[in-house]
């Protein structure tokens, strides 16, 4: 069977993607309409929570991003939108999904002059000590009570959000809530309680993998909290497409083409529905793979399926069973440089810039940029406005990482540790990579520093997790340097304090 060249595939993929987006979106129109309805209610001065939940690959992020795109066209009352996303790498980093957003809030035009007058605004110094230089009148409260500190911080953040929402509606979009740290979950519950009592037009848009809720007690408790009857929460549970929706998608893609009859398109749609079990991500990957194998064509804003019908006996040989197998098949067609870039992002577990990727892969600027362009066009990476890149779906990272040898994994983790230390990154980012790279002494010091920082923020559950990682790193050292004696004593004093 003739395969298309890499350049030809990228060109065809760029033509196919808008058609896929339009076709799949038609099946989710009712969900988008519900989001818009909630937003209209919010604009009238009502705090609302929209929770999009479902299993892997059902399109939660896809729906949320399309909703935000729709809001760009709302000229009657444009919203202020802040976005954040949690990652597995930052699961114990206090307030990580919110930090960039909150930092932007402290410099927002609506509150730059009034920030010191907002309730408990001095508590923001815990997250952003540099605010002291700009607002010398701010000061921390003197209490050592964890619950009081959490309450005061929540009131400060709630006041910030309400002040920003005075000028136009405020939308806070947080993706991958299943990876949010415990401190973020607790803060969100407190914020919701504050905003419930206000008339600020604030919409909290959250995406959550429902199959991971029960894996963490804190996540399960938070999920129960926001779904209580008195909460202004609308939950949209996304489910796989029905057979009829998949068939309708194929008809939409094949609009205006005359090579196949309606019955033949029904047959293709039904086969794809059975193969993918209606999972939107799986369906997308199968269609991309069919394009790669030259079994479908994109011509004149329509998809031609005639090759699929003519060679239908080879379908099962071309399309391996299972979403992960299909993604792996597509990954194998990437150029070596693209694979190196994607492997670096998959191993890091977070979004990276071109400069960071060049350090990790040792590619030239031209080779690195060409690889990034390939990965974006092949729909493996999403570029962000911050000039960073992240995976379109976390499954890609899991699959790619599992294909690496242990030696490859260790080397890349060690490079990531060196890069993070050079950038003076947060210690919490270093721990897992140092452990995976068998740099146990560095992992110990990073975990201790991360634990101390979490303790300063009164995020004691996260601090306990970091100190546990420090103890784990310590147990891996065959010989403990004398320089570790004092930090080890500090560790066990902290454990004694936590468990009092």
Image: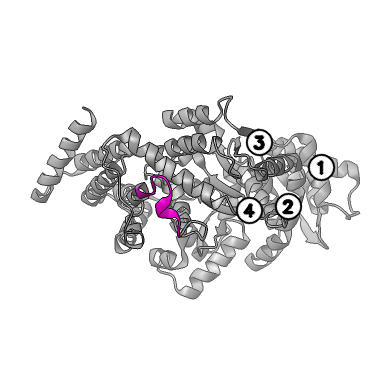
Neighbourhood count class around disc 4 (C-alpha, 10 Å): few under 14, some 14–19, many 20 upward: many
Q: Residue at x 25, y 51 (%)?
A: 439
Q: Secondary structure at mark 1?
A: helix
Tag 4 or tag 2, which sits nearer the N-term? Answer: 2
Q: Secondary structure at mark 3?
A: loop
In percent of width and height, residue 293 lies at 69, 56
Neighbourhood count class around disc 3 (C-alpha, 10 Å): few under 14, some 14–19, many 20 upward: some
Q: Which residue is mark 4?
A: 79
Q: Say whether residue 14 is visible.
A: yes
Q: Quadrant of the C terminus?
A: top left
On screen, 29 above or below 138? Answer: above
Along the viewing direction, whichever of 488 and 307 lies nearer the viewer: 488
Q: How is the image coloured?
A: one colour
Along the viewing direction, whichever of 229 and 429 lies nearer the viewer: 229
Tag 3 or tag 1, which sits nearer the N-term? Answer: 3
Query: Label 2 to label 4, Cα distance in Å?
Result: 28 Å
Q: Which residue is mark 3?
A: 238
Numbered circle sitting on residue 248: 1
Query: Label 4 to label 3, Cα distance in Å?
Result: 25 Å
Q: Which residues are magenta?
A: 113-122
Q: Which residue is mark 2?
A: 20
Q: Is residue 243 magenta?
A: no
């Amino acid at each position: 069977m003739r395969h298309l060249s890499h350049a030809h595939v990228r060109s065809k993929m760029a033509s196919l993607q808008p058609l896929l987006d339009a076709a799949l979106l038609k099946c989710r129109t009712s969900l988008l309409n519900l989001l818009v309805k909630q937003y209209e209610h919010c604009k009238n001065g009502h705090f609302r929570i929209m929770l999009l939940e479902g299993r892997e690959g059902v399109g939660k992020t896809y729906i949320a991003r399309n909703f935000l795109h729709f809001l760009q066209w709302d000229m009657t009352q444009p919203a202020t939108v802040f976005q954040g996303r949690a990652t597995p790498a930052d699961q114990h980093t206090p307030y990580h999904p919110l930090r960039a957003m909150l930092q932007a809030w402290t410099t927002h035009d609506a509150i730059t002059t009034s920030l010191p007058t907002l309730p408990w605004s001095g508590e923001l110094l815990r997250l952003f000590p540099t605010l002291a230089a700009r607002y010398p009148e701010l000061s921390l409260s003197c209490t050592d009570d964890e619950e009081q500190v959490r309450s005061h911080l929540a009131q400060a953040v709630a006041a910030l959000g309400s002040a920003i929402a005075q000028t136009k509606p405020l939308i806070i979009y947080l993706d991958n809530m299943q990876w949010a740290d415990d401190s973020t979950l607790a803060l969100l519950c407190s914020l919701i309680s504050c905003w419930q009592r206000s008339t600020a037009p604030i919409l909290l848009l959250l995406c959550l993998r429902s199959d991971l809720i029960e894996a963490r007690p804190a996540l399960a408790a938070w999920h129960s909290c926001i779904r209580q009857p008195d909460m202004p929460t609308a939950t949209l549970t996304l489910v796989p497409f029905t057979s009829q929706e998949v068939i309708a998608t194929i008809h939409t893609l094949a609009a205006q083409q005359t090579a196949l009859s309606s019955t033949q398109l029904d047959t293709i749609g039904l086969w794809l529905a059975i193969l993918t079990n209606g999972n939107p991500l799986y369906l997308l990957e199968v269609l991309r793979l069919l394009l790669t194998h030259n079994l479908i064509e994109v011509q004149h804003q329509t998809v031609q399926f005639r090759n699929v019908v003519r060679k239908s006996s080879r379908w099962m040989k071309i399309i391996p069973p299972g979403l992960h197998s299909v993604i792996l098949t597509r990954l194998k067609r990437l150029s070596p440089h693209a694979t190196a870039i994607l492997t670096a992002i998959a191993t890091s577990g977070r979004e990276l810039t071109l400069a960071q990727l060049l350090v990790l892969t040792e590619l030239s600027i031209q080779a690195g940029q060409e690889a990034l362009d390939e990965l974006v066009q092949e729909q493996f990476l999403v570029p962000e406005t911050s000039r960073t890149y992240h995976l379109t779906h976390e499954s890609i990272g899991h699959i790619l990482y599992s294909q690496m040898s242990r030696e490859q994994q260790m080397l890349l983790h060690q490079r990531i540790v060196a890069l993070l230390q050079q950038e003076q990154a947060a210690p919490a980012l270093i721990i897992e990579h140092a452990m995976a790279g068998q740099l146990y002494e560095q992992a110990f010091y990073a975990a201790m520093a991360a634990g101390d920082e979490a303790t300063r923020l009164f995020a004691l559950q996260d601090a306990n997790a970091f100190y546990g990682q420090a103890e784990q790193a310590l147990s891996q050292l065959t010989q403990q340097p004398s320089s570790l004696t004092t930090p080890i004593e500090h560790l066990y004093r902290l454990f004694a304090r936590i468990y009092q």
